[in-house]
Amino acid sequence: MVVIAALYRFARFADPEAIRAPLLALCTQHGVRGTLLLAREGVNGTIAGSQAAIDAVLAQLRTLPDCAALEAKFSTAPAMPFHRMKVRLKREIVTMGVPDIDPLASAGTYVAPADWNALIADPDTVTIDTRNDYEVRIGSFEGAIDPKTKAFSDFPAWFDAHRAEFTGKKIAMFCTGGIRCEKATAYVKAQGLDNVYHLQGGILKYIEDVPAQGSRWRGECFVFDERVAVGHGLAPGTHALCRACRLPLTPADQASPLFEAGISCPACHGSRSAQQRAGYAERHRQVMLAQGRGEAHIGAAPGDDAPP
């Protein structure tokens, strides 16, 4: 069984580049795979390996400035969900594109999963999903607003356009693991609104802790690894991934005549050239051959995407 750790921490790193090489070497030494992003504002990523290996990496991360209290959300998978280990340097660990937003200095109030239902059931609360449209499409909290953003960097403009609707309200925001909504609360507070809250540990912690019978979550939660989506209790979901456009596919999508494994789905079937489709087909053939040999094909992982 492979342990998966989703983690982030807003911090102040004077020299992220100096952190990168030792961290990559440690991960490689312990057989850990996944992606970690480093920036002056902290660290973000999802990694997988044995329990001892994950513990070693987390111990190293907690020695970094402002990271002693770094937390991770754990789940398991029967097989390694990533094909390689990457430690990347970025301008931001989650890209908003707005300078001088500092969640360490000013972020919303954390709300524990056990207290989240009461907050979002309050008629004076506006609940906002800060994830991207393709993630919201497969699951969200009952009654939450979908900004229909294509990227997190679209969120500030969307919020500015709708700000008047939220004046005088409590604003509750959430995302997959907590990082996007934490940064979004810092942005909202910078605009002068104070009654701002975010779900501690994100959706993943909520669906792990809150039983399905008492949950206000509907659907599945998209994750950036080979599991594609998870449900309550972090059980594997029903979605697959289109290897052409990277969108999550429902069982109905997978049953569509426009779905071709490894090549296209109903969303992208008519938008790819013959040359592209041939390339996807060859990649899929190589993936199947590698699987037949019991090997991993390094070109097949959604782990190339940035973590949530």
Image: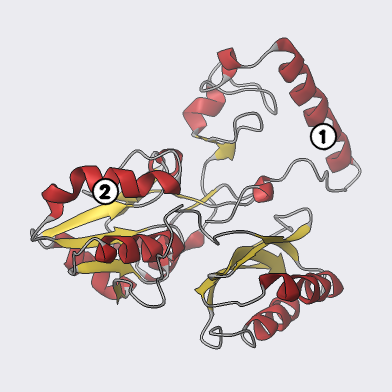
Q: Position of residue 89 (x, y in %)?
A: 67, 61
Q: Position of residue 116 (x, y in %)?
A: 26, 68
Relative to 184, say whether 293 is above or below.
above
Q: Nearer the viewer, residue 105 or 177?
A: 105
Residue placed furthest toward the right: 293
- Which kind of residue does numbered mark 1 sit on? Met
Q: Residues within 10 Å of mark 2 (few under 14, many from 20)?
A: some
Residue appearing at x 53%, y 81% in the figure: 70
Residue corresponding to mark 1: 288
Disc marking residue 160: none
- Relative placement, left or right, of 128 versus 94 is left
Q: Secondary structure at mark 1?
A: helix
Quadrant position of residue 206: bottom left
Q: Secondary structure at mark 2?
A: helix
**Mark closest to the chain's N terminus, 1 or 2:** 2
Asked if disc 1 and disc 2 are in contact, CB closer than 8 Å, the reply is no
Q: Nearer the viewer, residue 213 or 10?
A: 10
Q: Give the quadrant of the N terminus.
A: bottom right
Residue corresponding to mark 2: 159
Residue appearing at x 39%, y 43% in the figure: 154
| Distance of label 1 from label 2 (alpha carbons) | 44 Å
Q: Residues within 10 Å of mark 1 (few under 14, many from 20)?
A: some
- Residue 116 visible? The answer is yes
Relative to 299, say whether 82 is above or below.
below
Q: Nearer the viewer, residue 119 or 239?
A: 119
- Relative placement, left or right, of 112 versus 104 is left
Relative to 175, say whether 132 is above or below.
above
Q: Position of residue 302 (x, y in %)?
A: 66, 45
Quadrant position of residue 270: top right
